Image: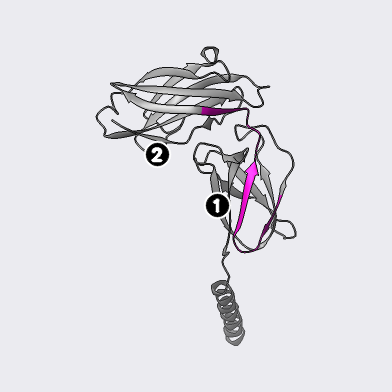
Amino acid sequence: MKLKSINTYLILLIGLMAASCDFDNFEEPKSTLSGRVVYNGEPLGLRSNGVQLELWQHGYDLFQKIPVYVDQDGSFSAVLFDGDYKMTLLRGNGPWMDQTDSIDVQVRGNQIVDVEVQPYYVLSNTSVNRNGDNLSVTFTVDGVNADRGLEHASVYMGRTMLTDAVRNDGIFNVPADQIELGTPVTIEVPIPGNLSARSEIFVRIGAKTVGIPELVYTQVDSITL
């Protein structure tokens, strides 16, 4: 009985050592897929990690999505194994029309792919300047696929570059009935008291579509106070 126990122990030990060697020899992914979410070739301003792309790779026993989160400047990056992937957009996740077709992506070394989307609205002709205790803000909301209504536009102010509808230190809302699409809007926005003593603040403008949780934003402006 003792001899059988010793033999069993040796077999288990050898198996564990072999598995450990296999684990140590496991090759990590080394290729990079990067790109931007764009409209007409220009990156869209988004909420950092608020929008997610999905990668799928067929032909393997473990078939599950690889989430890829988009940064606030519209860029994304993922480290992957070389291979053929399908990229999809989550329905209702971004401030654009749903896109049912997947995108074929070949990863062989470093690969760059821009993902073209059709937003409901975009912001243009934006400017932000200090005017005493206020910010003088100008922007235009343009309808691209305005089958969904505009809910509001908002000015978001914060202490860091990661400023949006979730992370901010001050908000100023402009209702949709005060916005004419394609026409510049100029407003005076009071600088919040909790930001007024700072040497600089960060400002973004966002446009909210009815029924869509994520906003489209301008890129971040740094304003010296």
Compared with 108, 13 (above or below) is: below
Element type at marker 1? strand
Quadrant of the image for the C terminus?
Answer: top left
- Measured as percent of width and height from the top left, residue 17 is found at 55, 78
Tag 1 residue: 77
- The extreme top residue here reads 177
The stretch drawn in magenta includes residue 48: no
Mark 1 belongs to which amino acid? Ser
Q: Residue furthest left?
A: 197
From the top left corner, tell me how far across and down residue 72 is, in percent: 49, 40
Residue drawn at x 58%, y 24% is 142
Residue 44 vs residue 77, the one in the foreground: 44
Q: Can you say which quadrant of the picture contains the N terminus?
A: bottom right
Residue 134 circle label: none
Report the magenta stretch's main SS.
Answer: strand
Query: How would you rate the neighbour count of disc 1 (Cα within 10 Å): few for under 14, some for 14-19, many for 20 or more?
Result: some
How many marks can you see? 2
Tell me which segment is drawn in magenta: 104-124
Q: Are marks 1 and 2 in contact (CB under 8 Å)?
A: no
Residue indicated by mark 2: 161
